[in-house]
Amino acid sequence: MVEFALKFATYNREVGGFGIYDSTKWDEFEKITMGPAIDRAKRANLINEEHVEQLRRFKDSYRNPYNHYNIKKITAPIVWEKAKILNVYTGSMEERDIAAKDSPVIQAQAKPYVDAATVLNVFTFADSVVKLLLSQLT
């Protein structure tokens, strides 16, 4: 939604408002990714430098890992502390910390917790960006 709002508000500004539709111009926006959409919104004076920094952090921290499903990056901060590891050959048990970045099994288990911990912040940020951009439409 954030990416679409960036593109739509910038398109609206560039064509001169709601009453005008330029399919060729919209096709141009359909082809750009979020990074160039941020730059274009800045050039159109829809966002300031602080917004640019926030949007780039959002893109790199949330949008890209989720859009490209990089579960290793999404769960990177998670560590399962004192996991009990059973050696099936010897029957011995040891405790060890396992970083999610080192284990696809831990990544799959950790992702729902990461999602639950971040969803409200992501939604709040997205909502504020969309409101900011849509409030500037003419």
Image (cartoon, helix red, strand yellow):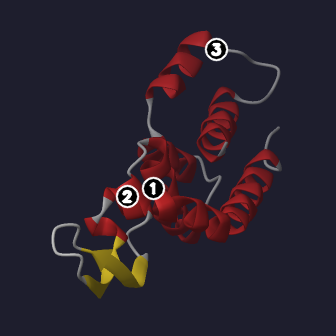
Question: Mark 3 or mark 1, which is nearer the start of the sequence?
Answer: 3
Q: In the current view of this chain or complex, which residue is farthest to the left? A: 89
Three-letter code for the amino acid on which mark 1 is drawn: Ala
Label 1 close to label 2 by CB (< 8 Å): yes
The residue that appears at 33% across and 56% down in the rendered structure is 104
Secondary structure state at the residue bearing disc 2: helix
Q: How many marks?
A: 3
Q: Residue 88: x, y in percent?
A: 23, 67
Label 2 close to label 3 by CB (< 8 Å): no
Q: In this view, does 63 lie to the left or right of 117?
A: left
Q: Is residue 136 left or right of residue 9?
A: right
Residue receiving disc 2: 105
Residue receiving disc 1: 108
Which mark is nearer the camera, 2 or 3?
Answer: 2
Three-letter code for the amino acid on which mark 3 is drawn: Asp
Quadrant position of residue 132: bottom right
